[in-house]
Image (cartoon, rainbow, N blue to C red):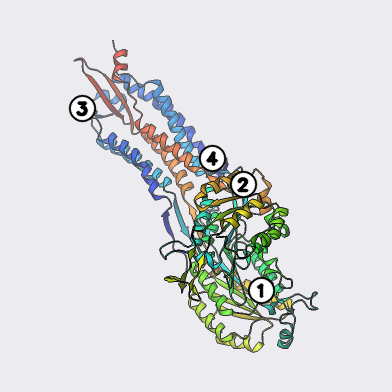
Amino acid sequence: MYFEFPEAFFFLLVLVPLLFLLSRSERRSKEIANTYKSHPPAKTFFTTRLILIVVFIAALITVAAMPFVPYEKTGSFVFLTDVSRSMHARHSCSEPTLLDRAKKVMRASLSGVPEARFGIFAFDRFAFPITQLTNDHAYIDEVIEHGLYVGLTYEATRTELANALSVVAQKKQRLFGVYGDVRHVVLLSDGNIEGDFRRSLREPIQQLRNAGVRIFAVGIGNPEATPLMAVEAGQCTSRNVEVEGQKVMIPFRADVLKYIANETLGQYFSEAETDELVRALRAELSLEADQTARSGTPPSHRDVSWVFLAAATLALFGLMILRPARTLREIDELEP
Amino acid sequence: MNVPESLRLVAAPLFLIILPLLLVLIRDVIGRSSDSTIALTGLEYLSSTKLNLQPRRRWYRVTLFAVIIITLGLLWARPEFQSSRPVFYADTQTRQKSIILVIDVSRSMAGPLESQSKADRLATYGKGDAGQQDQITRYEAARETVYSFVERFPTARIGLILFSTEPFLARWPTTGTSNRFDEILEENLRESSQLRRFSSLTNTDAALMLAKDVFAKHASTRGGAIVYISDAEDEIENMRLAIRDLRDEGIRLYAVGVGISESIVDELSQEFADDPGFRIFRADSEDEMRDAYRLVSELEEAPRILSEESAFVTDLRGIIALVLAVFSAIALWLLETRLHRTQVAGTSAEGGTWRHRVFRVS
C-alpha cells in the first residue's frame, strides 16, 4: 500500500496523550464507582474502549494520508471501432444505432478492466488512432461520448476492414515503443464488407499474426438486415435511406468477424457476451511492470481510503454502543 | 472568466452512512428513563447534600458526538473544492489551458516550406516528393510546431484536427501528450500513407468550425485557443467569417500562414488589430515558423490566460480527516475530563436495582 500524503502519520502523536488520558480515566471511573459503593466497569470495557479509540483515530489519520494500492496486473488493449456509415443503422429513431451499441460494449470493457490501458482506433475508409494508449478511462469515456462518430473522416461510406487491420499491425511494428505491449485488439463492427473477404483479409491477418496481435471481434448488429435511417442536421428522421428507390439495408456479417477472430487466434463475442469479453480481457492481464515505463503513462491505482473510513465508522459505532455497566446478572454475582 | 470557487460532494448519498450512528446518539439522549444524570465534584460532592443535576452536560456530550458523526458523514460524501488556484500541492488540475492544433494536410502541404512564390507552390501541387526529398515540407514544419507546442505546454489539454477537403478530429483534447501525437503524425505526406490518401483540397472554415464544436462539447473548457497552420490563401472570406465566429465564443485564434501572401496577412491583421485574441503570422522558412511558434507560445503563457483557463480541485477528505482526528482527540479529552461519565449500578437495600450515568465535574 502507498500513501499520497504520508506526512499525515505525524498526527499519530495525538494518540500518546490520549492513551495517558484513557488510563487516567479508568482510575477515575473506579473512584466514582467506589464512591457510590458500586462496581466499576469490567476491565474488558476499558480495553475495548482503548482499542476502539485507537482504531478510530489511526484510521482517520490513514484516510488523511490518502492510501492507494497499485494494480498488480495491467494490460494494453486497443478498440478498433467501425465508424462507417453502416454503423448508423437502426430500425427506428428510438433505437440506439449500431455505433451506440458498440460504445456500450466499449464502456463495459473499460469499467470491467479498470487496471488496463486502452486506446481507440476508428476506421471507415481510413483507420487512424484517435486516442493515445492511456490509463485515464475518464478521458477514453469522453472520447467515446464526443469524439467517436460516424463521419469522423470524409466519405465514411466504406468499411475498409482489411486496411484497418493492416494499420493496427503496422502501427505496432513502426511504433513499438507505443504499441509494443498490445497483443489484443477489440474489433467492434457489423462486419459489413463486400467481395471475397477471405482474399482481402489474407494479408492483413498475416500482418497481425506477425505482429503478435489477436483479435477479439465483437459483432454489432441484428440477425436480420437493419435499415439505415436518414439523418439530417444531426437528427434522426423517420425516413429510410434509399438508393434508386430501394431501402439501404445493412446486413450483419458475423461470419466475417468470426473468420478474423479465428484466423488471428482470438475470439468472437456477440454483443450479449460483453461479460465474456471482459473476462477474456481480464485473463490477458499480465504482471509486466515495465509496461508502464514503456507506455509513458502513470500506473493505475485504487483509492482504498474507504476501507479505513469504514474502520473509523465501525469503531465510532462501537464506542457509542459500548456500555460500561455490568449486566445485572454480573452485579448479582458480585453482590452476594 | 475565472473559475468560481465552489464546494461539492462527489458521493453525497454516502453521507447517509452516518444514520445508524445518529440513531445510537438519539437513543443515548432519549434513552432509558431509569437513568439519571448526576454531576459530581469528586469527593467535594460527597460533602454536599444537594444533588446537582446538570442536563446541560449531557447536551455537550451529544454535541461533540454529533459533530464527529456529521464530519465522518462528510468524509464519506467526498467533498471537493474547486478553485482557479491550487490550494494544496496534491490538488488535481481538472481544467487546463486548452489548445487545438488545426493542421492543413492538403496536397500542397507536401511541398517544400521555403518555396517563395505561389507559382512554385502550384507547380508542386500533387507532386509532393518530386525532387524535394532533402527539403523540409510544410507538413513537416507544421508537425515540428505541434511537437514544440506539446513540449512547451505539458499540462495543457491539446487536441489535434487534420484537415483537407474535410476536417478529421485526430485527437480529442488530452493532457496525455507524452507521445506528441506520434501515433498519427508519424505518417508523412510524401509517402503513400493513409494521410496522403486523405489529403486533397483545403476546407478551412469546416476545420475551424469543428474546433469550435469540440470546445463547445468540452465540458471543462472556457475560452481556449486554436493554432491553425495552413498554406491556403484562397479562403479569406470564409476565414474571416470563421474568425468572427470563434472570437464571438471567446476562442483565440493564431493563424500561421505558410507561404501565404503578405497582402492577406496585412488585411487580416489590420481588420483584427484591436482584437488581442487573433493573430496571423506569415512563415516562409523554418526560422519564421519558429518565430511564429515562439510568439504564439508567449501570448498563450500570459498569466491572465493561464489563471482564467485553469481549474484545480482539492480533495478535502485528507484535510477533513486530519481535522476530525485532532478534534476527536480533543473531544475525547473533554469527555474524559470535564464531561467524564461513567455508569454505575447496584442493588438497593429494598432489593431493587439502580443504574446511574454519573458525570464528574472538576
Residue positioned 59% across, 54% down in the render: A217
Cα–Cα span, label 1 and label 4:
47 Å
- Amino acid type at circle 4 is Phe
Cα–Cα span, label 3 and label 2:
72 Å
| In the image: residue B70, left or right of residue A199 | left
- Amino acid type at circle 2 is Thr
Residues marked 1 and 4, same chain: no
Contact? badges 1 and 3 (CB < 8 Å): no
Residue at image mark 3: B50
Cα–Cα span, label 4 and label 2:
30 Å
- The chain carrying label 3 is B
Nearest to the eye among marks 1 and 3: give it: 1
Q: Secondary structure at mark 3?
A: loop
- The chain carrying label 2 is A
Residue at image mark 4: A9
Residue at image mark 2: A74
